[in-house]
Image: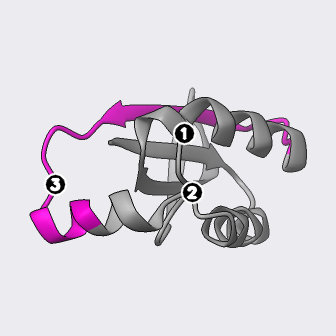
Amino acid sequence: MILFNIIQSDESYAKKVSEYLMQNSYALKVHIDINKTLVGSEEKPTIRLFFITKALLYTVIEKEVMEKFKSSDLLIYATPVSHVNVEYGELLRTKLKAV
């Protein structure tokens, strides 16, 4: 499992991408964080989508998000999830898209 992160600056974009991810069984739920990033002395809005998914889906999700939701400030990355609650892990394995 991985924690998949999508960072950009548009809140309406975040909602559209989140709906797409859940409709296509890439995520069971998507968290949306609204933050600010400091670049030099300038503050910029940052919207971070994150969700747990199967590691083998990374390339597929990245490709589809880049194609369908291209954005000039899009940043995508993932981090490994080494432990997950037994019940939630089972739910992820059975409900997310088969690989």
* Percent of width and height locating residue 66: 80, 37
Q: Amino acid at mark 3?
A: Val
Along the viewing direction, whichever of 77 and 36 lies nearer the viewer = 77
Along the viewing direction, whichever of 34 and 85 lies nearer the viewer = 85
Residue 84, numbered label? 3
Q: Is residue 15 above or below residue 2?
A: below
* Percent of width and height locating residue 7: 60, 45
10 Å crowding of disc 2: few (<14), some (14-19), many (20+): many
User: Under tag 1, what secondary structure?
Assistant: helix
Q: Residue at x 53, y 51 (%)?
A: 98
**Are the two marked residues, 2 and 1, in contact with CB atoms closer than 8 angstroms?**
yes
Quadrant location of residue 76?
Answer: top right
The residue labelled by disc 1 is: 57
Along the viewing direction, whichever of 77 and 74 lies nearer the viewer = 77
Along the viewing direction, whichever of 83 and 9 lies nearer the viewer = 83
Q: Is residue 81 magenta?
A: yes
Quadrant location of residue 11?
Answer: bottom right
Q: Is residue 91 magenta?
A: no
Instruction: Measure how far apart labels 2 and 3 are at the Cα level.
Output: 17 Å
